[in-house]
Amino acid sequence: MDELEAIKVTFFQECEELLADLEGGLLAMQDGTSDGETVNAVFRAVHSIKGGAGAFGLDPLVRFAHVFETLLDSVRSGKVDASPDLVALLLRASDVLADHVSAARGMGDVDEALSHAMAAELEAWDGDGGAPAPAAASATASASDDDFDLSAGVAAELDDMDFGFTPMTISVEEQAGADEQAAAGWMVVIQPKSDLYRKANESLLLLRELERLGPIETTVDDSALPDLADMDPEASYLTFKVKLTTDKSEADVREVFEFVDGDCDLTITPLMAGDAPPAPAFEAPALEAAPEPVAAAVAAPEVDVAALISAATAAPAPQPAAAAPVAPPPAPVAMTPAAAAAVAAKPTTAAAPAKAPLEAPGPGQSVIRVDPERIDRLIDLVSELVINQAMIAQRVAEHGIPQSSNLAIGLDELEQLTREIQDSVMAIRAQPVKSVFQRMPRLVREVASMVGKQVRLVMEGEGTEVDKTVIERLSDPITHMLRNAIDHGLENPDERREVGKPVEGVIKLQALHRGGRIVIEVTDDGRGINRPRVQKIAVDKGLIAPDLQLTDEEIDNLIFLPGFSTADKVSDVSGRGVGMDVVRRSVQALGGRISISSRPGHGSTFTLSLPLTLAVLDGMVVEVAGQTLVVPLAAIVESLRPKPEEVRALGPTGAVLAVRDSFVPLVDIGSTMGYRANAPDPTDGVVLLVEGEDGGKAALVADNIQGQRQVVIKSLEANYQQVEGVAAATILGDGRVALILDVDAVINLRRREAPAPKPTEPMIAAE
Amino acid sequence: MIDQTTAVGERRELISFRVGQQEYCVDIMAVREIRGWSPATSLPQSPNYMRGVINLRGAVLPIMDLSSRLGLGSAEPTVRHVIIVVKVQERMMGLLVDAVSDILSITDDLVQPTPDVACDRVRSFVRGIISLEGRMISEISLDRLLPEREALAA
């Protein structure tokens, strides 16, 4: 990959984050939980995407982002009111923008017609709200003239409309514009915040940019500098005052600071001819007292802050002179009003850097980008450490060293430490479910418009953390559950009106931790499950016996049966009858469970629970024919020692186990897996009653149970290939590899030898 | 094959080892490490030349009984047996052999094509024969050894 490609990859990664920020901000605006900063953040997100796209020459993306940004700018400046309709439009525009980003990335296409229509709509809206502005201001030079033609056209159409208040605002600007013409230049006061430097911006570059507009005279106000001992080397204490002689407009000057927007306090005041810059008068005493290097730096028109700080830090503490300029002058000579203001403003300056880390721990700040592979490697190493530690413990026990000995106690401590390390390392890889959740609003919007329903999605617990391995698998089931809820759960707007519900349906998507698992719930306020109908369909389709008595809960869960579909019509969205049973199977494959509960007339709740990580597994360690195997605990219903009268022969070789009035086929793990030719007498061994993914039960026969243990899952496929009957491998305390049994495959392997009857649903099997 | 692009006269290093009474070798660049035999966990539903899997510092490493793979009969591994850990494409695999002999430095012109007399299996696994000081050493084509590779080659 060449360098540019590498940067491009980073750009697209950032795009993902920016799009997420954009959508998050817009959703906050929709919920009414936004503040002025939200609008700014939304604007910056689009702006940054545009900027980056421009650098890579991604023209379609730039064009669309530009239109989008223009409207957002109007919203930001208050020219256009952020009405709910507008926010809805912006949300749809963000979807189109996301499509453009994907297309630029070479993944997927942009619906050109949609994109154009959206761009036109955005422009129209901008013209609508801010119509008179461009028309009136067209005389003023601006950075974005290219917008004006479009908007002006719209503006002309809308001239009849009464937007009396808007020209008022503009007339002020016009006034300012008039001042601009008279001004000999600008007094620019730049007070960078620490964030500016943290984002790798550089005040020196800003000053150089300013110099391009005309000759500059720069002075630095270091009055905010604390004592050397109190100084935070990464904080920003300096304020730059730039006297810029130019005929350029204020907008041109502001443009220089486009990319540090929000990261510095900027005041631009017109400088009348003959205006004396107030700052130097104040600076002078401080400068005189300053030691040589600092003074030199300050005197230079272009001040390198880093150099200044390093000069200050390098100055040895015992030198009182070095501290002098750093401390605020106790009694400033001939303090001008401006200087007084600067001093008055000082406490806020000092407070700002201290406050910043507290209020903004959001994305981008103090977050390290790490290649996931490195973390995976770390997790591998730590799990090896755990295994190694277990090996040592086993060796120590073998040598008969007493539990109370120092060695054993030290080992116990080591074990605790390694467990803690393992937990912490797993926590690094844990991610909030937000990354999955944030894709859902778009899905809901699309599905809702497809089926003609009004839906509001409420999300909770986005911060719930779960291992990366699980995150990746969450998206599909959630998508299915949401689609199902919108399509089948919610009523049509007319129906809702009839039963006295608000037309807008509410779907709640919630994530929480419960009992060491992550639980995802999708709740709708729709009609709930029509139980008599569901049971009738299941009977009609031959999925259950007609005279079967089922509890409400059992009826609700019939929708997970393969081949079940309640939709009268097969819709585009769901209802093909493959939906829920496929979801259930994929969830169970991950060691999860999915269920539904419903209250007729009030709605339904899908509940999905998954283990927090797929990297470790709770298993039962068993011995079979001299081999040590791990059976996933999630599959085991119970374990028991069969009594001779419970084992019944069936056919020439088959046998079943009587478990509370039902008969479960006995499967000898050893002979099924090919470890031994003949199955031993089940009563000599232990039976694990397991439930497969399709609900089928089996009684697995093992020789012995060693115990329950948490094991680290190791892939067999990484170096070899999939082996039938084996889900994965793990490494036990003795350093040997043990195979993790794939319960379903074992049941199926046996079936292949002797074709079994059609698998039955668990609750029905328990008839 | 990649090796054919190697200019004649360019030296390559090979590790030679014994399987039964015969001598074989593999390119040293494919060898990751050589370790003593440790008992493997057997894999069900697998060809009999797959000895099973062992723990290689946290990774699950499949072990192939080269003797059985070459049709020379299963090895009865002892502590003197050796596992040569090789990397084939992106996968790691352990080859169970009797003993490692030495490191050969050869040029490609020393490699003779596999004679026609050999059976199909040998022809697909052996990419050439090196005659050195009266010994006959067959170079193994590693990417053909894994079961699915064999299927592809067939």
Image (cartoon, rainbow, N blue to C red):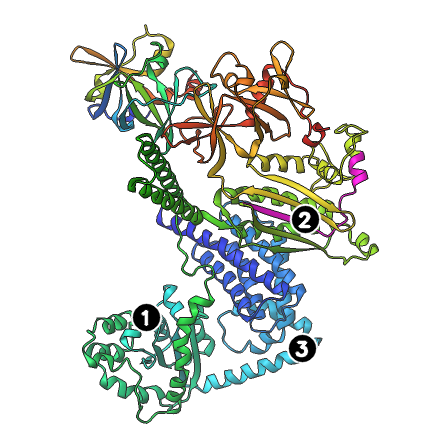
Q: Residue beneath label 3, please?
A: A163
Look at 50% across and 12% down and name the residue there: A677
Query: In the image shown, does A719 or A763 lie closer to the viewer?
Result: A763
Could you say which quadrant of the image residue A542 lies in? top right
| Position of residue A753 in the picture relative to residue B112 (left or right) | right
Which comes sooner in the sequence, label 1 or label 3? 3
Instruction: Give the residue at the far left of this rendering.
Output: B133
* Number of the front mark, 1 or 3: 1
Q: Is mark 3 on a helix, strand or loop?
A: loop
Chain name for mark 3: A
* Residue type (three-letter) at the residue carrying disc 2: Val
Residue ID at (76%, 43%): A529
Task: Name which residue type carries label 1.
Answer: Asp
Amino acid, disc 3: Phe
Front residue of A743/A117: it is: A743
Badge 1: residue crowd in 10 Å (few <14, some 14–19, many ≥20): some
Q: Is residue B128 left or right of residue A85?
A: left
Find residue A385 and report its horizontal and vertical position in percent: 35, 39
Mark 2, chain letter? A
Query: In the image, which disc is placed on residue A232?
Result: 1
| Residue drawn at x 61%, y 43% as measured from the top left | A608
Dot 2 or dot 1, earlier in sequence: 1
Which mark, residue A179?
Answer: none
**Residue A520 located within the stretch drawn in magenta:** yes
Kindly check if marks 2 and 3 are in contact, taking CB atoms under 8 A apart as contact.
Answer: no
- Magenta segment: A517-536
The secondary structure type at the circle numbered 1 is loop
Q: Which numbered dot is residue A447?
A: 2
Which residue is pictured at 77% across the width and 50% down the height?
A491
